[in-house]
Amino acid sequence: MALIVTITGSPTAPSRTDAVVDHVARRAAVRGHQVQAITLRDLPAEPLLRADPTAPAVADAVAAIERADAVIVGTPVYRASFSGLLKAFLDLLPRDALSGKAVLPLVTGGSLAHALVGDYALAPVLRSLQPAYVGGGRFVLAEQVRLHEGGGAVLAPEVLAALGAVASAFVARLEGRPAEAAAPATDRPAEVTARVVPVDDPVLRPLLEELQVEYGTRYARDSVNERLVEVPVTDFDAPHGAFVVLERAGVVVAGGAIRRREPGVAEVKRMWTAHHARRQGLGRRVLQELEEQARRLGYHRIFLTTGPRQPEARGLYLAAGYAPQFDLHADPEELGHLAFEKPLVTSVQTLAS
């Protein structure tokens, strides 16, 4: 697997640039690639200003880049260009520092007027260091990244989709495989079908990888929940559990699972919709399929939790008739996990009512 070094040139913390770079790096890490981060504001200032690559911390950063197979470079826009901190670091690198490496530039800024800074200011400097390839990169508006105190960030849906496409193409190139083709634009998308799959089915890989990336980005923690190991994977096997996926044109676009929480009560886990397929009602469809599976397995009630930084999930569960087990007016960050419950009405009960 490849060694990917990230370079972030924001002088401030917390930083939207850091969050964007971290999100893309996580997408590479879940594929098994090693990631090493260089945060330029943490390097000693005097060697950077003097272009002195011999200072120990600077020398370590340069050595990391020399070892890397690929480099992700992130910067905010200042005065219609990339940051001076990044420029100072790039200036002290050897002329062939990026030789043979794939490079991906990522830029954040407060206005779309600066959307081409990556193409016309940063990319030429990167190319002067003789990389094998400079990816198309991405510009992200600052307002599309909401930072949380203590770490973590929520990215707007359109940013998730754009960064997902950029990261997928970049990682595919590192792995020597073709990038996934974008779904063709159509007024009538292919029909979505549902099916139950075993927990070891390879079709679950993108679902599980994206969940880890999204949880890691939003909460910036390395807990059992973010690593998806808080419950045994066998909990999702029959006869007490089930994993359901939705497929469109043979591609998994959403999914979720149930497990036995207690006698008669199922718990929903692993709810996910692909970044490019959101706002299409797929989450509601997954819930309906999981509820049906829970009825077939003999459950009479269904339970689930979501995190305080997942307002989309909270809205989905409320709209689907799940009763909140918490004060809706309280600060979600103070509550932590938000619990919901719903009775499962059988066909007999429906006719009787």
Image: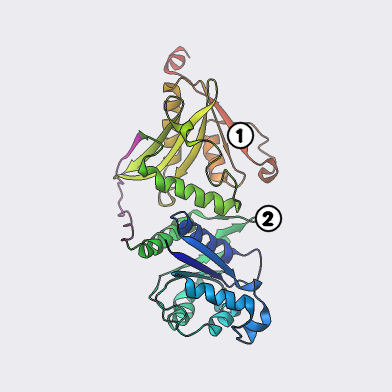
Q: Nearer the viewer, residue 252 or 279?
A: 252
Residue ID at (36%, 43%): 203
Determine if the magenta segment contains residue 27: no
Q: Is residue 32 above or below residue 170?
A: above
> Is there a contact, CB below 8 Å, between mark 1 and mark 2?
no
Residue ID at (65%, 63%): 14
Determine if the magenta segment contains residue 179: yes
Q: Nearer the viewer, residue 271 or 191?
A: 271
Q: Is residue 280 above or below residue 243?
A: below
Identify residue for label 2: 150
**Residue 301 visible in rendering:** yes
Rendering quarter of residue 60: bottom right
Q: Is residue 148 above or below residue 99?
A: above
Report the side of 224 relative to 72 (left or right). right
**Residue 105 visible in rendering:** no
Position of residue 241 measured from the top left corner of the image (x, y, whole percent)? 45, 29
Identify residue for label 1: 339
Q: In terms of secondary structure, where does tag 2 sit?
A: loop
Q: Which residues are magenta?
A: 177-195
- The amino acid beneath tag 2 is Gly
Label of residue 107 in the image: none
